[in-house]
Amino acid sequence: GAVVSQHPSWVICKSGTSVKIECRSLDFQATTMFWYRQFPKQSLMLMATSNEGSKATYEQGVEKDKFLINHASLTLSTLTVTSAHPEDSSFYICSARDSGTYQPQHFGDGTRLSIL
Amino acid sequence: GQQLNQSPQSMFIQEGEDVSMNCTSSSIFNTWLWYKQDPGEGPVLLIALYKAGELTSNGRLTAQFGITRKDSFLNISASIPSDVGIYFCAGQPAGGTSYGKLTFGQGTILTVHP
């Protein structure tokens, strides 16, 4: 149980384009999803917290107009990197947690984004 | 903000050896989690700890939630080559605006020589 699917796993695109990444909880309803960014050989950096049916909460320093987050259902959250540039290239990972006090975050397999 | 100090940063061990890593925090956490991440993949949950003093095992892995709620350790016994990867501790605060968020340690890179 507690499977989180992230798609695509790898994307290369030209500078200036927008890229959408999907995060789905396959066997549970995720009231909260999280989006992280990870640089090589570093830990995970939280970008934003996404709650179903409400606006995402962004961490300090994360541009909300650059990284659009939508959490339209209890099983799907999307991250759109708008007008992507080479400095946006990174490994993006989502996680999801079920409702309840003692529910850990379960992670997707990540998306490797490369902007040329 | 909150920070977790995870040590060691890296370990090079022989197959069959035991491994120990730990995390300490300057503030209290309500939950401690241990994840393993393989290259190019997302972290996978190994052990979740919810109560101070709790000692939990998952196969060859054992983790404990420190009594002070500011630390946790993970032990791996009789390591095998597939244990290779990066291990992260993560703490979750009790409540407030940070409820549900995780603070991650810097990671421990484990290399196991056959």
Image (cartoon, rainbow, N blue to C red):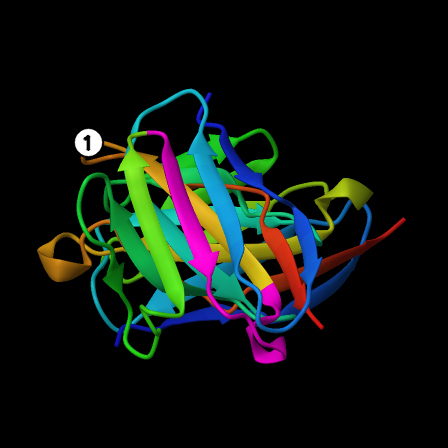
Residue B53 location in percent, x, y? 28, 45
Q: Residue at x 24, y 49 (%)?
A: B100
Q: Is residue A104 above or below residue B95?
A: above
Left or right of B68 on screen, residue A20: right
Nearer to the camera, A40 or A9: A9
Q: Report if residue A10 is visible in the image.
A: yes
Residue A93 location in percent, x, y? 51, 52
Nearer to the camera, B108 or A25: A25
Q: Is residue B90 magenta?
A: no
Q: Residue at x 9, y 58 (%)?
A: B96
Nearer to the camera, A26 or A70: A70
Which residue is at the far left? B96
Residue B48 location in percent, x, y? 38, 39
Nearer to the camera, A39 or B90: A39
Left or right of A114 on screen, residue B23: left
Number of numbered discs visible in the structure rendering: 1
Quadrant of residue B49 within the rendered picture: top left
Q: Chain of mark 1?
A: A
Q: Please give the range of residues in magenta.
A: A75-90
Assess disc 1: are there few (<14), some (14-19) or many (≥20) residues with their C-alpha within 10 Å of its C-alpha.
few
Q: Is residue A78 magenta?
A: yes
Residue beneath disc 1: A100
Task: Indicate the secondary structure of the residue bearing disc 1.
Answer: loop
Which residue is at the far front? A16
Residue type, mark 1 in image: Gly
Residue B10 location in percent, x, y? 66, 68
Q: Residue at x 38, y 35 (%)?
A: A76
Q: Residue at x 58, y 47 (%)?
A: B42
State the quadrant of the C terminus of chain A: bottom right
